[in-house]
C-alpha cells in the first residue's frame, strides 16, 4: 500500500473476506456476499471493491458494492461473467476466502435542496443504485425513484410494485421487490419484452417521467446513474434537456485501483479546461456534464 494515492490512505482496507453466500441468476449473473467488516463500515453508495477472483489469477477485478451492512460486517456485490477472471470467481463457494481491497472511490453526493432523486441503473450498473436507495431511506425528506434497465433477465425476482408512481406510463408496474419493501418506488425497463417492464431504454423511461413534471418539480430533481458508457451519455443528454443536474458512476478497466497506474484515466472538463482524471480515486462518480459535455 506504500504506493497508494494519498486519497486512499487510511480509507481503503485489505481484508481476507469469507464468502457467506453466492447466488446465481440467469445470463451469468451472480450476487456474492462477503464478510468484510472494515469495508462494510466505510463503504458509501458509488464506491467499489477490488476483488481477487482465484489463486491463479493475479489481477483483481473492480466490482461495485450493491449493499453493505456495517453492523453485520458484510457487503453484497453483483457481477456478470465477462472473461476468465469473473468466470473463476463464479466457481468460488461459501466458506472460501477472497482478498478484498476496499472501499475505493468517491461516491455519490446527495444534495438536500434536490429531494427528488432519480436513480438510473443499467445492467451491472444497478448495484450502486440499490446502495444509494438504501442510504436514502435514512433521509426523511428524500423522495427517490429508481429506474433499472436490462436486456437480459434481471438479477432478482421481478414483481409488480405496490407503490404508485405518478407520471409513469400505463402498464409499467414491474419493480425490484426489495426496493418496494424499503418503500422506495422502482420501475423496470427492457427491450426484451419482459412483462410489466417499459418497452424501451431506461433513459427513454426517465425522459417520459421527467416530461410529466412541472418546472417547480424539476427544480427538485437530481439524477444519479451507473451503467454502460452509451447509457451514461444518454443520461447526461436527458438531464441537460430537462435542466437537472446529473452524477454518473463510470465503469473502466483497472489495474491497481488505488491511483498508482493511471490506467483508468478519462478526460473530464474542468474550469481550467480538459484534464485527465483517474476513475478509481478521482471517481468513479463525476458530474455528467464534465464527462459528457453537451
Image (spheres, rainbow, N blue to C red):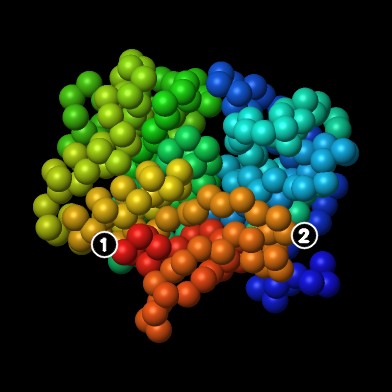
Seen in the image, is 64 located left or right of residue 202? right
Q: Position of residue 124 (x, y in %)?
A: 52, 38
Name the residue rendered at 72%, 59% in the picture. Answer: 256
At mark 2, the secondary structure is strand
Front-most of residues 227 and 260: 260
Quarter in which the C terminus is drawn: bottom left
Front-most of residues 107 and 70: 107
Quadrant of the image occupied by residue 57: top right
Is residue 52 shown above or below 21?
A: below
Front-most of residues 238 and 179: 238
Crowd rating for badge 1 (residues with CA inside 10 Å; few <14, some 14–19, many 20+):
few
Seen in the image, is 79 located left or right of residue 184? right
Seen in the image, is 262 located left or right of residue 152? right
Q: Position of residue 213 (x, y in %)?
A: 15, 48
Residue 50 in sight? yes
Seen in the image, is 52 located left or right of residue 29? right
Q: Position of residue 94 (x, y in %)?
A: 80, 28
Name the residue rendered at 79%, 72% in the picture. Answer: 3
Quarter in which the N terminus is drawn: bottom right
Give me the disc on residue 144.
none
Crowd rating for badge 2 (residues with CA inside 10 Å; few <14, some 14–19, many 20+):
some
Is residue 250 shown above or below 152?
A: below
Q: Position of residue 172 (x, y in %)?
A: 26, 25
Q: Which residue is mark 1?
A: 294
Quadrant of the image occupied by residue 289: bottom left
Q: Which residue is mark 2?
A: 13
Pointer 1 and pointer 2: residues touching (CB < 8 Å)? no
Residue 129 in sight? no
Nearer mark to the viewer, of 1 and 2: 1
Name the residue rendered at 56%, 52% in the picture. Answer: 252
At mark 1, the secondary structure is loop
Q: How many marks?
A: 2
Amino acid at each position: 500500500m506504500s504506493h497508494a494515492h494519498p486519497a486512499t490512505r487510511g480509507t481503503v482496507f485489505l481484508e481476507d473476506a469469507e464468502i457467506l453466500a453466492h447466488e446465481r441468476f440467469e445470463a451469468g449473473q451472480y450476487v456474492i456476499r462477503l464478510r468484510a467488516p472494515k469495508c462494510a463500515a466505510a463503504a458509501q453508495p458509488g464506491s467499489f471493491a477490488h476483488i481477487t477472483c482465484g489463486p491463479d489469477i493475479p489481477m483483481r477485478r473492480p466490482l461495485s458494492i450493491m449493499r453493505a451492512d456495517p453492523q453485520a460486517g458484510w457487503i453484497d456485490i453483483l457481477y456478470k461473467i465477462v472473461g476468465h477472471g469473473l468466470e473463476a470467481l463464479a466457481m468460488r463457494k461459501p466458506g472460501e476466502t477472497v482478498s478484498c481491497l476496499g472501499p475505493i472511490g468517491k461516491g455519490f453526493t446527495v444534495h438536500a435542496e434536490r429531494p427528488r432523486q432519480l436513480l438510473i441503473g443499467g445492467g451491472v450498473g444497478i448495484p450502486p443504485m440499490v446502495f444509494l436507495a438504501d442510504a436514502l431511506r435514512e433521509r426523511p425528506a428524500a423522495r427517490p425513484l429508481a429506474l433499472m434497465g436490462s436486456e437480459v433477465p434481471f438479477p432478482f425476482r421481478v414483481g409488480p410494485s405496490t407503490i404508485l408512481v405518478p407520471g409513469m406510463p400505463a402498464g409499467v408496474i414491474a419493480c425490484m421487490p426489495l426496493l418496494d419493501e424499503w418503500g422506495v418506488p422502482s420501475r423496470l425497463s427492457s427491450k426484451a419484452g419482459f412483462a410489466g417492464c417499459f418497452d424501451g431504454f431506461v433513459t427513454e423511461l426517465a425522459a417520459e417521467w421527467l416530461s410529466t413534471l412541472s418546472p417547480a418539480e424539476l427544480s427538485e430533481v437530481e439524477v444519479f446513474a451507473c451503467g454502460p458508457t452509451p447509457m451514461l451519455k444518454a443520461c447526461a443528454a436527458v438531464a441537460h434537456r430537462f435542466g437537472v443536474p446529473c452524477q454518473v458512476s463510470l465503469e473502466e478497466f483497472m489495474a491497481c485501483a488505488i491511483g498508482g497506474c493511471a490506467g483508468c484515466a478519462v478526460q473530464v472538463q474542468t474550469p481550467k479546461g480538459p484534464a485527465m482524471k483517474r476513475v478509481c480515486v478521482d471517481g468513479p462518480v463525476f458530474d455528467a456534464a464534465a464527462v459528457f459535455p453537451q
